[in-house]
């Protein structure tokens, strides 16, 4: 994020100062920014980290449901809601957004083609190295398609995920 911010500042300064103008063009002015870049990053995060997020969600849900209240002694404790059931309800309500995202991912994956599921599986398997060129080459070799095809398929998956998330009220 810091690198993106620094690049944005550099490009903005170049535009203001007129630095880098060659033959009336700015070096990066022709590239259009993706207006849904942030939304696609959110969807990509849930897709790639689905299993970890689901495991954490289930652990949090179990912890909340199994949290038994201590025996009452009549003395107030802390600044939280006094009613343990209300506290558990509030905590469970905070998990509803994660639950909705998990359902969006499940619905999205159910509608993917076999090749797109394989692409998603490879990205999930190598999630620590998704941005590395060696993993991109591995995915290209595994699928037997070009780098451009992999990129287009991934962008299509992310766009479908964004549309589902908008329908569920998770994105605008």
Image (cartoon, rainbow, N blue to C red):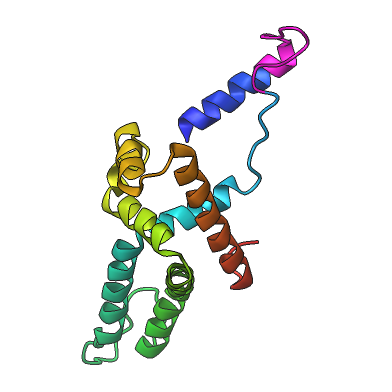
Task: Please provide percent x and percent y for residue 68.
Answer: 24, 87
Residue 60 placement, left or right of 35: left
Which residue in the rendered view is the most extreme toward the left? Answer: 71
Residue at position x 53%, y 49% from top? 155
In this orientation, which residue lies closer to the viewer: 121 or 147? 147
Residue toward you, 84 or 153: 153
Q: Position of residue 5 (x, y in %)?
A: 54, 30
Q: Is residue 162 above or below residue 36?
A: below
Rendering quarter of residue 164: bottom right
Q: Position of residue 126 (x, y in %)?
A: 28, 48
* Quarter of the rendering containing residue 67: bottom left
Q: Going by the image, does 152 lie left or right of 68?
A: right
Instruction: From this view, report whether residue 15 is shown above or below residue 146.
Output: above
| Quadrant of image for the C terminus | bottom right
Q: Main secondary structure of the magenta part?
A: loop
Looking at this rendering, what residue extends furthest in the right direction?
24
Labels in figure, total: 0
Residue 18: % across, % down: 73, 10
* Residue plotted at (42% across, 72% down): 106
Q: Depth check: give the residue in front, 142 or 135.
A: 142
Pick the front one: 74 or 150: 150
- Residue at the (34%, 51%) spot, across then down: 123
The region drawn magenta spans 14-28
Q: Check residue 163 for magenta coloring.
A: no
């Amino acid at each position: 994020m810091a690198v993106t911010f620094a690049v944005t500042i550099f490009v903005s300064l170049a535009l203001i100062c007129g630095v880098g103008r060659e033959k009336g063009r700015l070096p990066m002015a022709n590239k259009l920014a993706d207006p849904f870049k942030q939304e696609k990053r959110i969807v990509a995060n849930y897709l790639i980290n689905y299993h970890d997020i689901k495991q954490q969600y289930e652990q949090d849900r179990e912890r909340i449901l199994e949290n038994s209240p201590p025996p009452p002694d009549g003395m107030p404790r802390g600044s939280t809601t006094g009613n343990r059931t209300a506290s558990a309800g509030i905590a469970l309500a905070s998990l509803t957004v994660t639950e909705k995202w998990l359902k969006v991912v499940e619905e999205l994956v159910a509608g993917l083609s076999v090749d797109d599921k394989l692409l998603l599986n490879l990205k999930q398997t190598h999630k620590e190295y998704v941005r590395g060129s060696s993993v991109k080459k591995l995915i290209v070799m595994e699928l037997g398609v070009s780098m451009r095809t992999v990129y287009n398929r991934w962008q299509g998956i992310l766009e479908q995920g964004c549309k589902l998330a908008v329908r569920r009220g998770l994105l605008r």
